[in-house]
Image (cartoon, rainbow, N blue to C red):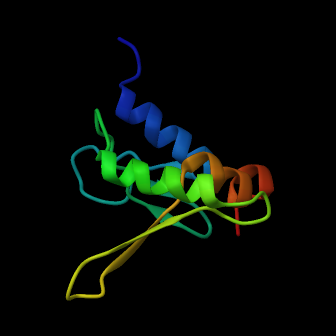
């Protein structure tokens, strides 16, 4: 049996962060751990289109010397998530750059 797609996604993200995938065997915890980051990976068949569009718009409006990202803000709470396309993350911060910002 081949490696499951969600496991391959976790392995890819671990490599990007210069870390390792954590095997849980039914115990809850982070999916990826590195020297500088803890990552929870969520694998889905399809990401919400409005989030994909927000990141795409940031990429369209950005220049080569600036990191394109989308800020998602929850109304009335101030809860904010910064979303960066994985390819841009890897280019700016990934293991090819030493695995650390």
The residue furthest top is 1
Residue at 51% x, 55% y: name it. 57
Residue at 70% x, 69% y: name it. 101
| Residue 34 placement (x, y as % from top left) | 58, 61
Q: Nearer the viewer, residue 81 or 12?
A: 81
Answer above or below: position of 7 versus 88. above
Answer above or below: position of 75 versus 10. below
| Residue 4 placement (x, y as % from top left) | 36, 25
> Seen in the image, is 44 located left or right of residue 13?
left
The residue furthest front is 61
Residue at 72% x, 66% y: name it. 66
Q: Quadrant of the N terminus?
A: top left
Residue 17 visible within the image: no
Q: Report the number of discs.
A: 0
Answer above or below: position of 1 versus 12. above
| Residue 33 placement (x, y as % from top left) | 51, 59
Q: Nearer the viewer, residue 81 or 15?
A: 81
Residue 50 visible within the image: yes
- Based on the displayed image, in which of its 4 quarters is residue 5 positioned? top left
> Seen in the image, is 55 located left or right of residue 76?
right
> Seen in the image, is 47 located left or right of residue 54?
left
């Amino acid at each position: 049996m081949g490696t499951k797609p969600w496991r391959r996604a976790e392995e890819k993200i671990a490599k990007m962060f210069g870390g390792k995938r954590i095997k849980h065997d039914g115990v809850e915890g982070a999916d990826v751990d590195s020297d500088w980051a803890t990552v929870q990976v969520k694998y889905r068949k399809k990401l919400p289109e409005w989030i994909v569009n927000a990141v795409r718009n940031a990429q369209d409006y950005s220049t080569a010397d600036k990191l394109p990202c989308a800020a998602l803000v929850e109304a009335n709470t101030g809860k904010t998530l910064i979303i960066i396309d994985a390819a841009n993350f890897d280019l700016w911060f990934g293991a090819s750059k030493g695995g650390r910002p």
